[in-house]
């Protein structure tokens, strides 16, 4: 890895100024075991689901848990299906419907890439509410718990985007930036890292603090609302530095598709926070 970084940062041989960094062309496969190989994005999903499972297991040991250990184990399958199916269908519907209408079987080729956070978010919400209904427990409280660990998944996903050299930022217009394979010769904003910092690290820290140090987890909808507002604002800001999807560009509204889809998430988050503050804490209802 050290030799890899030294090659990537060899400015002299590349004829670049020290302010410009070049991302090397990493292999698409983060784990190669001969006939079996996992792409970086697959590893990100595995890490996110594994960490979320472990962290939720710690969280349900607190008083007034939303579910027991057996229910948690069963829920993870629902969540994984919600993320994958929702993320894929969201990308198909929101970002490239023409392509997939012409070739519907391409929808099944997940290994070709193409996932949408907004679709995955919708899939998780449906999974939480449906699982809660099947178990006769609060789907909104399940969603709160999942919201507190979701930023770690966003962090993993954005780091995978960065390693893959995809979803990169707009050209900086200066001698500062990163040159991505396939992104042309211009230095660009590492928008994947901006998103990783805001949606991943910062939002995770805020939600974990609220969960462990305050009574937020006992007010159904509050943590989900904070997640919605925090993610929405982070994504809306970073979209100003991210290269718009080539097949969509800037919409007639002056916004990108990512910003457009994020606005309802912010509004829903504000609504959930408002409703949660007017509810009695869970412990007080017991």
Image: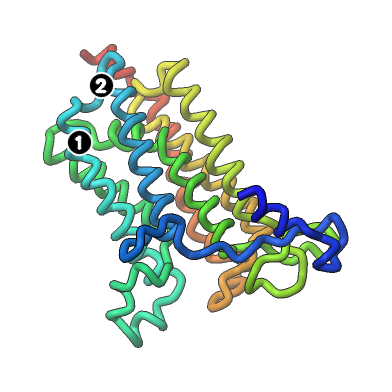
Look at 28% across and 52% down and name the residue there: 82
Q: Residues within 10 Å of mark 2 (few under 14, many from 20)?
A: some
What is the quadrant of the C terminus in the image?
top left
The image's mark for residue 133 is none
Residue 73: which numbered mark, if any? 1
Can residue 150 be seen here? The reply is: yes
Rendered residue at 85%/56% (across/down): 18
Label 1 SS: helix
Q: Residues within 10 Å of mark 1 (few under 14, many from 20)?
A: few
Instruction: Tell me what residue is drawn at x 47 percent, y 16 percent.
Output: 213
Q: Tell me what residue is drawn at x 53 percent, y 58 percent.
A: 161
Label 2: state its secondary structure: loop
Q: Quadrant of residue 170?
A: bottom right
Q: Nearer the viewer, residue 124 or 262?
A: 124
User: Residue 126: x and y, percent?
Assistant: 26, 49
Number of marks drawn: 2
| x and y percentages locating residue 78 in the rendered image | 22, 47
Left or right: residue 228 versus residue 36 is right
Instruction: Determine the CA span between mark 2 and mark 1.
Output: 14 Å
- Give the labeled residue for mark 2: 65
- Residue sitting at the far bottom: 102
């Amino acid at each position: 890895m050290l030799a890899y970084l030294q090659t990537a940062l060899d400015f002299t041989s590349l004829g670049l100024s020290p302010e410009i960094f070049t991302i090397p062309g990493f292999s698409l496969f983060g784990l190669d075991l001969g006939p079996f190989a996992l792409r970086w994005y697959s590893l990100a999903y595995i890490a996110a689901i594994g960490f979320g499972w472990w962290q939720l297991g710690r969280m349900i040991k607190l008083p007034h848990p939303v579910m027991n250990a057996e229910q948690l184990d069963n829920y993870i399958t629902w969540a994984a299906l919600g993320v994958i199916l929702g993320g894929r269908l969201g990308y198909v519907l929101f970002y490239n419907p023409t392509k997939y209408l012409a070739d519907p079987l391409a929808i099944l080729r997940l290994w070709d890439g193409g996932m949408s956070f907004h679709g995955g978010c919708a899939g998780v919400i449906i999974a939480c509410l449906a699982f809660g209904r099947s178990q006769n427990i609060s789907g909104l409280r399940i969603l709160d718990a999942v919201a507190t660990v979701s930023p770690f998944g966003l962090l993993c996903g954005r780091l995978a985007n960065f390693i893959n050299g995809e979803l990169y930022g707009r050209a900086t217009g200066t001698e500062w930036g990163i040159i991505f394979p396939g992104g042309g010769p211009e230095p660009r904003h590492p928008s994947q890292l901006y998103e990783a910092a805001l949606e991943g690290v910062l939002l995770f820290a805020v939600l974990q603090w609220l969960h462990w140090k305050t009574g937020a987890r006992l007010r159904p909808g509050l943590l989900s609302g904070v997640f919605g507002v925090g993610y929405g604002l982070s994504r809306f800001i970073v979209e100003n530095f991210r290269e718009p999807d080539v097949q969509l560009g800037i919409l007639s509204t002056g916004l990108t598709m990512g910003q457009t889809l994020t606005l309802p998430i912010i509004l829903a988050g504000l609504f959930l926070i408002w409703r949660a503050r007017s509810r009695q804490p869970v412990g007080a209802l017991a």
